[in-house]
Image (tube, helix red, strand yellow):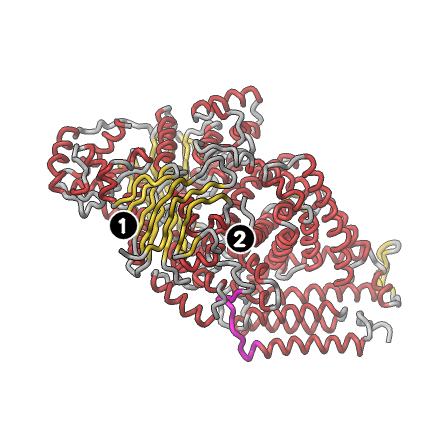
Amino acid sequence: MKSSSTKTIVATGLGAALFMVLFMFVKVPSPVPETNLQIAYGVSAFFAALFGPLCGFLVAFIGHALNDFIAYGSPWWSWIVASGVSALVTGLASSKIAPRVEEGIFGKDEIKVFVLYTAIGQAVAWLLVAPILDVVLYKEPVNLVFTQGAIAFVMDLLCAAIIGGLLLKAYASTRTGKGTLSKND
Amino acid sequence: MKTKLFSYNQLDTFVHRLSGLTKLLCFILLTSTVMLTYDIRVNIVIMILSAVMMRISKIRFSQIKIMLIYVLIFLATNFVLTFLFAPMYGTEIYGIRHDLFTIAGSYVVTKEQLFYQITKFSKYLSVIPLGMIFIFTTHPSEFASSLNAVGVSYRVCTSLSLTLRYFPDVTRDYTTISLAQQARGLEMSGKAKFADRAKSIAGILVPLILTTIDRIDLISNAMDLRGFGKNKKRTWYARRPFQVSDYACMAVCALILLVTLYIRFVINGNYFYNPFVQ
Amino acid sequence: MAETVISFQNFRFQYYSQAEPTLHDINLDIHKGEKILIAGPSGSGKSTLGHCMNGLIPFAYRGTMTGTLTVGGIETKTASLFELSQKIGTVLQDSDGQFIGLSVAEDIAFALENDCVPQKEMKVRVQKMAELVDIASHLNNDPHELSGGQKQRVSLAGVMADDVDILLFDEPLANLDPKTGEVAIELIDEICRLEKTVIIIEHRLEDVLHCPIDRLILVSEGRIIADDTPDNILAMNTLVPHGIREPLYVSACRFAGVPITSAIRPASLETLDMSACKDKLHAWYKANAKEEPVTEKRPLLEVSDICYSYDGVRQVLDHVNMTVYEGEMMALVGKNGAGKSTLAQVITGFLKPDAGTVTMNGEDLSKYSISERAEFVGIVLQNPNQMISKAMIFDEIALGLRIRKVPEEEVEKRVEAVMEICGLRPFKNWPISALSYGQKKRVTIASILVLNPKVLILDEPTAGQDYRHYSEIMKFLQKLNENGQTIILITHDMHLMLEYTERAVVLCDSVKLADQKAYEVLCDIDLSRRANLKETSLFTLAKKAGIEDPLGFVECFIRCERELR
């Protein structure tokens, strides 16, 4: 009903805060030992799908960078950029998803588009961007970074697609019937 | 409940008095210095410099202890994994091989591998204190205005500033919602099975995200009403004006970068500092 | 006549997504320097009216407008939001959402920053505004270190920094405790004297009338019902039928048969002509006074010697003791930060106390996990959106049972029983998104009740509700209580305490200050001041009328009003 650039800016700021909160406090151990499922990627995918690629990129980028600052004292740029890229690609689908979701619809077609873009985004991020940057910036061994990237790809894709999808579904359901509601409750 | 994002402490030291913009630029310059070469000598110089700065800015060990533990765990894991995945990478890089001892089969420890890994280790480690100094001595209000000054769009900077502002609020929402849902029976502890945990998380995330969306509407109205986005730029109340010391610090950092570039292109003539081949 | 600054002419507005117009035939002129109160129940269109004036309509909310509206001489239809924001400043009800800066000074400066005012000038103007609203000593504080009232002052300073002539306050009392609200109203009054035009949108009439206003505009169903002085409107007796509560002392006078005319100046207790009502009040009290029977009660929940501290330095609860009796509805009151919510979280097991125990029927509850404890004590959060995670009402209420692996047949039975109690039966298959706020609140209450907790705690159950919704929620809670449910209400709503709870426990600065009848708390000037409450106007009225036992008068009024309900 309401769209403005201010709203996108605010959504970016709060989305990043939410991303950080989940990144810091919600740790779900994954089936692979010593790794956690990062629920936060569901949030960045959600914001990307609703508010576009730049918002998505910044939600993950700011959220991840600030988290690193707090946890390690210094950011791990290669993975932060990759986080941002993953959501950026999901955001490219927002013109197809957001208007429908605002009308209360998140059906099969929208889910397909969402999952497809999310999968591409996560693949680009973890199979290309993160490992290449690791090699370029830190001279990490190539086979090591690609293995790490592949693990991150699988887990973050799961989170982004499932959690992001659930959130979009839930959000869409609050948009139903807006116009049809009569005044007497 | 944690209400402050960073343990920024209001002290009055030389480093605290620098403008946030200066600290950001120095952080970027020195980080670039480390990134542009693979030279352990440069890393050591930066490490010494940042140790001195930490001293000056009165950062206490207790403040950084937990961070340091995380970093060391990470680096130790990385150290082991690097060796497991690429035991001969150092030899490849430096183009020569001096065996030290054999662990098993093809896992031979070479001087070059050890040197490569230690250099990498020092590279990571020299960047860490720089970030810590920036975080501990810069008031959060100055982050956004500093970034704006180095050319990042003010809209993006405003987003960052909102993240810092509302992080504690979102944290509080998260805690409240999470507790209320646990009371209804959602199991968050390790006891629960994976599928149950996933369900529990959805049970917390849905209300959390819908509450956040409500907040977004409200804040964007409040900002619109106060003229946000009226002009192509904005000014910042919290920006700290430059002093002589600001220029001096930037000059020093720029000099370090230039010297490093000189070493890399003229003296080493290579990305890697190679003590093995003269 | 002063210059007209806001003028609605045959104005009509319809939201893009709504089937019918929200505002009809609005004709209204507001003059320079006036102080106006716009009152009306939720959904009456009073907020829409405010949005039209500050430009959020049509800038942020789409819809169709007919007729004209000019603000400060510009036609809003064609103006930009920025032009309007130079004329009219808005203080929103949610002071947290409006607090955008990382510190007080930055927030005040926000409008100036957007205006590209140079830093030097900004510092001067911020300082000046901060002094005006008396917040200058907190310039470097961050929002989490401020109380609700202080945050509101910051918002006001931020709006005034832009040097606007018209100030619009959207429900300024919504999130404040009574004492802070009173101070806020006084501050608004002072601002008005600086030749500003002030428009207040509120439904808490008695609290706004603490300081005089020039005109009261009553809005209902999108139309202006009355536009007159408060004295005249009170005399018309049109407030209650339109869902606005009149001041309690006015209701008391009506009970006593005093004819309310504008001649007796009913808008304020200070101006009220006592000679016109004194005798009737005395006579009424004599006729209705009687002793209250004392009933024997059994203790259910015992909180003993609880200590709690978040940081190990400042005690938030300091040896607090409290007993909750079976079947009662009691209030837990005290100003913000006094420890009410912390105590509730200790009772529900969300927080582990540093010392002390919580027992139910003599059984120590500390051995149970949070979710097991929910079967003894249930808590309903203030904002229903913080609890709802399902799309359908039935699923939402069933959630707690399904997680506990209760067989589906029994789930169905229990959910239906609870829906019946909560009046949600007709909505069984509705999506939650189609419900009103009050109905959502009921769903969250039902979702907790379904676990059969012996004690139900509600955090500010009526916050942000108008009189009609407030009564609806409270009647429902009262019905639950009559069915034997023990209820603790955390609140600072004085009406709620007075009318619905028998007993109030007052927390102040981490210790228990009092544990007595609710109306006694509100008749004790010292006690209510320390708890950031206000003395009830009924008590003041009784004293002014010279009634010997003013406490008895208050008690009598409440009893009579309950009987009437």
Question: Overall secondary structure of the magenta stretch?
Answer: loop
Q: Is residue C8 above or below residue C83?
A: above
Label 2 and label 1: CA atoms lie apart by: 40 Å
Q: Is residue C186 left or right of residue A131?
A: left
Question: Which residue has dot 1 on it?
Answer: C213
Where residue A24 appears, x then y in whole percent?
Answer: 60, 50
C350, A2: nearer the viewer: A2
**Nearest-to-viewer mark from 2 and 1:** 1
Query: In the rendered structure, which amino acid carries the disc numbered 1?
Result: Ile
As helix, strand or loop, the secondary structure at mark 2 comes to helix
Q: Is residue C147 above or below residue A185?
A: below
As helix, strand or loop, the secondary structure at mark 1 comes to loop
Where residue C313 appears, x then y in whole percent?
Answer: 43, 55
Question: For residue B237: magenta?
Answer: yes
Res. B143 visible in picture: no
C498, B188: nearer the viewer: C498
Query: In the rendered structure, which amino acid carries the disc numbered 2?
Result: Phe
Write down the region rendered in magenta.
B234-246
Where residue C487 appears, x then y in whole percent?
Answer: 38, 32
C349, B270: nearer the viewer: B270
Question: Which residue has dot 2 on it?
Answer: B167
